[in-house]
Amino acid sequence: MNAPAISAHGLTRKFGSLVAVNNVDLEIPAGKIYGFLGPNGSGKSTTIRMLCGLLLPSAGTATVMGMDTRQESEALKQQIGYMTQRFSLYEDLTVKENLRFISEVYAVSRAQRKARVEELLTQYNLREKERQRAGTLSGGQKQRLALAAATLHRPKILLLDEPTSAVDPQNRRDFWETLFELAEQGTTILVSTHYMDEAARCHSLAILDRGVKVADGSPRSLGENIDMRVIEVEASDPNRARLSLAQETKITSITQLGVRLRVLLPKTLPDALQMVQHNLQSAAINAEVREVFPDLEDIFVAVTQRRRAEVTP
C-alpha cells in the first residue's frame, strides 16, 4: 500500500493550561481532499500550523510527504502550499508583483519564473487585474490570487485554512471546482471549514470538537456509523410540532429547517418513527414523518454531543 501523504500520531498542542489540540491521529491518502470540520476554537488552525511546521507540537509526531514536521520543517515549507484564512499577500503590490515575489521566495528558476506567473494569471482569471494593487481586489479575487500564490511552486500538498470564509457562494463554488482539478492532478489537499456543505464535498474528513477528533471517514461512512437515526418531519405548523416533540425526553436534538424538522433519536430506540408519529397525532398536528439518511449537520450534532456526554461527570 502507498504511504499516506500526511500522517500524525498523538498530535497535541498546549498553550499554557489550554489544550488546543488533544491527541489527534491522522492518515490522509495522496491525491484526495480531506476536510477538518469544526467550529471556531475546535483546533483546526492549530493542527494545520503543526502540519506546516509553523508550530511545534507539545506531544506526538507528524510526517508530511515522509518529512518529520519537527526535524525537517524548513525543507517542508518549500514543498507545501499554505493558504491562511486572512489574506496574507502584500496589499500595496500589484497582482503580478505579488506572484513574482512569491516565485522568488520559492526559488523558482529564472527560466521558469515568468512563464509560471503568466500561466497562473490566466488559470485563475487574474489577467485583467494583473496591474491592480492586491488591497483593492474583491474578496473572490483575493481568494484566487492567494490560491495562485500557494500553488505557484506546484506543491504536492496544499493546506487551506478556512479559505472561503470571506467570499460569496458563487466564488466558493468556483473555488471548489479548482480544488477538484488540483486533486485530479495528484495534489493532496487538506482544507479546514465550518461550512457543512463544503465539508460534504471532501473525499474524507475529520470532525474536531474542542481539540479532539471525534469522528473521521467519508461523509457516507460517517452517516452510516453514527449511533443516531434521523426522522424528518414536514408539518403545516412546524413550530407547534417542534414544541410538542420537545416534550419527548428520548429525543436528542430537534432542528427546524423552514417547514421541516430534523429529529435525532438513539438507534437503540426501536420504535422511533412510531413515537414521533404518535406524539404529533396526539397533538392533532398534521405532518408527514419519515426516516432519512443523516446529513453532515446531523452527524456533527450526534458525534459532538456523544463526546461531551462521555466527558461530563
Image: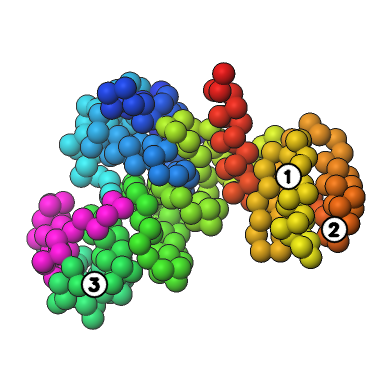
Residue 100: numbered disc? none
Q: Which residue is mark 2?
A: 285
Query: Could you tell me which residue is drawn at 14 percent across and 61 percent down?
Result: 90
Task: Name the amino acid type tagged 1.
Answer: Ala
Instruction: Work out whether residue 73 can be spotted.
Output: yes
Label 1, label 3: how many angstroms apart (C-alpha)? 48 Å
Q: Please tell me which residue lies in front, 281 or 64.
A: 281
Residue mark closest to the camera, 1 vs 3 = 1
Sequence-wise, which precedes: disc 1 or disc 3? 3
Q: Is residue 79 above or below residue 92?
A: above
> SS at mark 2?
loop
> SS at mark 1?
loop
Q: Please tell me which residue lies in front, 152 or 264.
A: 264
Label 1, label 2: how many angstroms apart (C-alpha)? 14 Å
Query: Could you tell me which residue is drawn at 73 percent across and 44 percent down?
Result: 246
- Residue furthest to the bottom in view is 128
Count of residue discs = 3
Task: Name the amino acid type tagged 2.
Answer: Ile
Q: Is residue 106 magenta?
A: yes
Query: Could you tell me which residue is drawn at 65 percent across and 59 percent down?
Result: 257
Residue 246: numbered disc? 1
Horizontal arrangement in the rendering, residue 180 relative to residue 257 (left or right): left
